Each structure stands twice: as structure tokens, then as C-alpha cells.
């Protein structure tokens, strides 16, 4: 639900922007909240650059997830180019390995001396890139963070950042330098394409399919009976899963586990819990990715008493799940986990050379 709110907000921002020939030109550094299910695809990509100031400040530093602004200069994880008084175009190209779908970029610049840049995409490294974002107003960026949300997602394997405007100010070094270039897309919930079954249902309106319909207002409810209950996903063929997200109606499960199976009959525990969920929305990251055709939420025991979110406690012998989501990627639970691993204070106009 949060994600939809964010997208709507960004759509409003973009509607006020100029849209020319499919290229959106918006002021830099529009700030948007990160969605919980975003993945930074750049982290698993490889990068090449037009040039670099030192061997250390190379392409790899732009996609290592580290923004350490307060670190000693020699340890700062950033890509830095040579100087150019003619503002020769500097490029950073990220190969995502395979085609990915994304709609969000975050660039953590070292300084606000950047005036013009663009982001373009292509399916082959040397093909014809098409622009998806252009800033060419010649004005210095006003924040060291450029947060760019596209109005439509794009799918491509190669993403190129071209910086063709950079002043000497602030500072005395006419170059391009950035800590991180994040390429963000929404992870795919594999459960929505799976077939869900369960040990039963409370009513016709709460069958297992309601836990995989992508709707946070519909839910599976177990038969009204004490004992164990289960909810099973069949992906149709093997899938690789690293993260499960469970949206509980009540936090009344007291012992439960995620299990995998090759045949839907014989089960092996992936992750087990012996206490109630700490939140109505639980994110479970497996210790390692599992490749499996079947995945099951097995509730060994539960309390009859429990409160739906925002309501008084009720006593009723069921467990119920609004959504049982599963993802290939390792997902964080908060925006803080999405952002770079080391993120320090932003320096404004203070910097060193
Ligand atoms: Ca970095
Ligand atoms: Ca649902």
C-alpha cells in the first residue's frame, strides 16, 4: 500500500515536468521515499567508465553500495574522473548481466558542481542508447543526492550515465565524482503466479488463493480448528526464493516454519520460528536462497486469542494471512536497509581536495 502511495506522489511531481519525445526533463534531486521491495540492480552488475582519476577511484566504487562521505579521502568509495576545463563527457556504464526492469535512480554525487547529465539505456553495450532522463538546464544541482523517479519503468541490460556539464565550483577541481549510482526496480512477487492450496478454509471467501492475489484486503483463513494448519505454493516449476513476506491478520501463530519440497509431499525446513510474529507484516530472509517448486507456510501451533491490526483482541480458532509473498531477491525491511551500507552525513558545500 505504501508503494502505491509513493508512485502516485511521483506521478504528480512528474506531471508538472516537461515531457519531450518520451524523455522526461525534471529538476534534479526530487526526493521520493523508497519502496520496501526495491532492488538496486547495479549492485550485482559490472561497471566501466570513460576514465578515472586514480586506480582506486574506479568504476567498481560506483556500484559497491558504499557511500562513506565522512571517511578519510583515500578510503572514500567513489568514482572520480580526470579534470576537464572543456567539460568533456564522462560516462559510467553499468552492465546489469541480464535485462532488468527499473524505474528509479539515485546518484550520490561528491559535490554539487554537476550541471548537465543524462541516463540512457540499451540492450547491447555498443548499441544505440535511448535517453530516459535528461538534465540539460545548465544549473548546478542543489543537493549531492539526485533522486530520479521515471514515470514509466524501462527494461534494459545496459545503463549509461553521461555527465557533460560540470563546473569548477564548488571547489577547485573540474571533474565528475560520485559515490554511488543506484539502479532501482521493484522486485517481482513470485507468489502471484503460483497456485496456492491449504489444509482448508474457514469460508468460501477465504480460500488459499486469497493469500496470493496481491491484494492486502483479502485473506486466507484456516479452518476453525485447533492444531496445525498450512498454506502451500506450487510455482509450476523450480524457482529460486530468498525472501518471504507474510502479512498476518493476527499475530497469533506461536510456532511456524517455511518449508520447501520437490514433490509437494516431503518437506524440509527452510526457516523455523518458535515465537509469535513481531509484526503484522513480517519479512523473512532465508539464510541462503532455495531453489524449489513448492514452498509451504506450516503453522504448527497458534493462540486462539489475538488482535487484528487496529482492533481489539478476539478469540477464534483460526490463523489467517492476507498475503504470502515470495521473492528471488534478498529484500530489506526498511528504507534504511535499501540505502547504501555506509551512509554518513552529507557535506553540503564543504569538501576537500
Ligand atoms: Ca561507492
Ligand atoms: Ca490477499
Image (tube, rainbow, N blue to C red):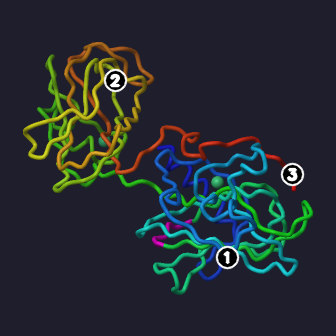
SS type, badge 1:
loop
x and y percentages locating residue 42 in the rendered image: 53, 60
Q: Is mark 3 within 8 Å of ligand 1?
A: no
Q: Is residue 176 left or right of residue 203?
A: right
Foreground: disc 2 or disc 1: 1
List the residue tagged with mark 1.
Answer: 50
Q: Is residue 352 visible?
A: yes
Secondary element type, mark 2: loop
Does the magenta portion include 155? Answer: yes
Residue at x-position 35% and y-position 48%: 327
Q: Quadrant of residue 23?
A: bottom right
Left or right: 159 in relation to 97: right
Q: Earlier in the sequence, mark 2 or mark 1?
A: 1
Image x and y of residue 314, in percent: 32, 14
Image quadrant where residue 216 sits: top left
Q: Quadrant where the C terminus lies?
A: bottom right
Residue under the point 48% across and 41% down? 332
Q: Which disc, if any, is residue 250? A: 2
Residue 204 falls in image quadrant? top left
Q: Label 2 neighbourhood size at 10 Å, few (<14), some (14-19), many (20+)?
A: many
**Which mark, residue 351?**
3
- The span picked out in magenta is 151-157
- The disc at residue 320 is none
SS assignment at label 3: loop
Residue in view at x 63 percent, y 60 percent:
62
- Say which label, 3 or 2, has the lower sequence index: 2
Residue 194 counted in the magenta span: no
Amino acid at each position: 500500500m505504501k508503494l502505491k502511495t509513493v508512485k502516485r506522489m511521483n506521478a504528480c511531481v512528474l506531471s508538472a515536468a516537461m515531457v519531450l519525445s518520451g524523455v522526461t526533463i525534471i529538476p534534479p534531486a526530487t526526493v521520493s521515499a523508497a519502496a520496501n521491495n526495491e532492488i538496486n540492480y547495479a549492485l550485482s552488475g559490472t561497471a566501466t567508465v570513460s576514465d578515472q582519476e586514480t586506480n582506486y577511484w574506479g568504476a567498481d566504487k560506483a556500484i559497491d553500495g558504499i557511500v562513506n562521505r565522512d571517511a578519510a579521502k583515500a578510503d572514500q568509495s567513489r568514482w572520480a574522473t580526470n579534470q576537464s576545463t572543456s567539460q568533456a563527457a564522462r560516462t559510467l556504464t553499468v552492465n546489469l548481466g541480464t535485462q532488468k526492469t527499473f524505474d528509479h535512480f539515485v546518484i550520490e554525487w561528491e559535490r554539487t558542481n554537476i550541471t548537465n547529465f543524462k541516463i540512457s539505456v540499451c540492450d547491447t553495450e555498443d548499441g544505440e542508447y535511448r535517453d530516459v532522463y535528461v538534465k540539460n538546464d545548465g544549473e548546478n544541482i542543489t543537493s549531492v543526492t539526485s533522486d530520479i523517479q521515471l514515470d514509466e519503468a524501462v527494461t534494459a541490460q545496459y545503463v549509461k550515465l553521461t555527465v557533460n556539464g560540470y563546473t569548477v565550483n564548488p571547489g577547485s577541481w573540474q571533474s565528475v565524482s560520485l559515490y554511488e549510482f543506484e539502479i532501482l526496480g521493484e522486485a517481482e512477487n513470485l507468489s502471484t503466479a503460483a497456485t496456492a492450496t491449504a489444509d482448508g478454509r474457514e469460508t468460501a471467501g477465504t480460500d488459499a488463493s486469497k493469500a496470493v492475489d496481491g491484494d492486502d484486503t483479502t485473506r486466507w483463513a484456516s479452518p476453525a480448528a485447533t492444531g496445525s494448519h498450512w498454506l502451500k505454493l506450487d510455482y509450476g516449476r523450480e524457482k529460486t526464493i530468498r525472501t518471504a513476506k507474510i502479512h498476518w491478520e493476527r499475530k497469533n501463530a506461536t510456532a511456524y516454519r517455511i518449508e520447501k519440497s520437490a514433490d509437494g509431499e516431503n518437506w524440509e525446513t527452510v526457516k523455523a520460528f518458535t515465537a509469535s510474529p513481531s509484526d503484522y507484516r513480517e519479512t523473512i530472509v532465508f539464510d541462503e536462497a532455495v531453489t524449489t517448486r513448492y514452498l509451504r507456510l506450516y503453522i504448527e501451533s497458534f493462540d486462539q486469542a489475538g488482535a487484528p491490526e487496529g482492533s481489539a483482541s478476539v478469540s477464534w480458532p483460526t490463523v489467517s494471512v492476507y498475503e504470502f509473498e515470495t521473492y528471488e531477491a534478498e529484500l530489506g525491511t526498511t528504507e534504511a536497509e535499501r540505502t547504501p551500507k555506509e551512509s554518513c552525513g552529507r557535506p553540503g558545500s564543504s569538501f576537500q581536495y
